[in-house]
Image (cartoon, rainbow, N blue to C red):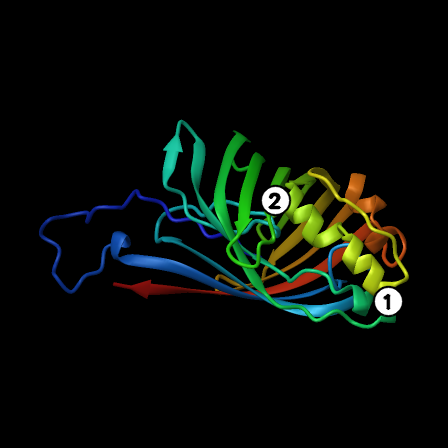
Amino acid sequence: MGLLIVSAIGAFPASSMAQDTTKSSSDTWVVTLGATVEYGPNYEGSKHHSFSALPSFDFHRLGEAPEYSAPDDNFDYTLFDLGGLEIGPVVGLRDDRLDLNNLHLQSQRRVRWNFDAGGFAQYWLMENQLRFRTEVRQSLWGGDGLVGDLGLDWFQPVGDKWLLSAGPRLSLANSIYMRSNFGISAGQAARNGHVSAFDAGAGLKSVGLTVAATYTVSPEWSVQIYEKYNRLVGDAADSPITSQFGSPDQNIIGFTLNRTFNIDF
């Protein structure tokens, strides 16, 4: 998913004598739309894989240098910049919870998209090179709980065309999220007949690594390939959903095609 950052700093016209028909950089926005195809687990903890598609979106004012972003950044909006510490709301996509009957039958899980929302904070330890970022997001409906993600990314341009990035990940979740995605109630276990009840508690959910390579084809077009690897730990790994039917190793490979254009207002 792509990063959405809006800066509150505008540019003023170079001269007050400019004609009304002339657009200043503050009136022009650079918009990037992307389409992503991913190949990864059908659901968190699954050992079966399938393809999925995701949109991405980014914009900034003409003349402002866009910030680098990682492929697992969610859509955000910078409200405050406190000495380089950026803070604001964030929105992400989340799939639906597990169906134990589907697990027992080893069939494909139906995926129903859900939204989560919360806040993000990020700080550039080295400008446009080393970034720390954290997101905390709550499911908007369905009672699917709260997750917190932390990441550290190194961004390295190579020549004029390539941008490489890599960094570790850590993810935590509250008890509601863990029970929804990895817990098995006594009633569910009795109805299923092939698993035991499991109480998944809050805490560390996964650790991992995200790497990406972006190639600028032209000022209008760019492509990105990335890999996101997460290793489920704790109750997320011990749950029968993972240990009996799935795998703690969660690997996602993605490819994104981006188109950039200007919009005048």
Q: Earlier in the sequence, mark 1 or mark 2?
A: 1
Give left or right: position of 58 versus 80: right
Q: Amino acid at mark 2?
A: Val
* SS for dot 2: strand
The answer to whether 86 is drawn above or below residue 210 in the figure is above
Quadrant the N terminus occupies:
bottom right
Position of 163 with respect to 140 (left or right) is: right
Mark pair 1, 2: CA separation: 27 Å
**Which residue is painted at 57% across and 35% down in the image?**
131
> Label 1: few (<14), some or many (≥20) within 10 Å?
some
- Relative to 241, 60 lies left or right: left
Q: Who is closer to the viewer here, 210 or 174?
A: 174
| The label number, if any, that marks residue 104 in the structure image | 1
Q: Residue at x 50, y 41 (%)?
A: 120
Does 28 appear above or below 111? above
Per the rendering, the mark at residue 216 is: none
Answer above or below: position of 83 versus 72: above
Give the residue at x 72% y 40%. Answer: 201
Q: What amino acid type is highlighted by mark number 1?
A: His
Q: Are marks 1 and 2 in contact (CB under 8 Å)?
A: no
Q: Secondary structure at mark 1?
A: helix
Residue 102 horizontal/vertical position (percent): 80, 69
Examine the rendering and report whether any part of residue 232 can be seen. no
The image shows residue 52 at horizontal and vertical percentages of 67, 69
> Residue, x 88% and y 51% (percent of image)?
243
Looking at the picture, tell me which residue is in the foreground, 151 or 177: 177
Judging depth in this view, the residue of 87 and 205 nearest the camera is: 205
Viewer-proximal residue among 51 and 145:
145
Quadrant for the C terminus in the image: bottom left
Could you say which disc has been placed on residue 147 in the image?
2
**Residue 219 percent coordinates (x, y):** 48, 61
- Count of numbered tags: 2
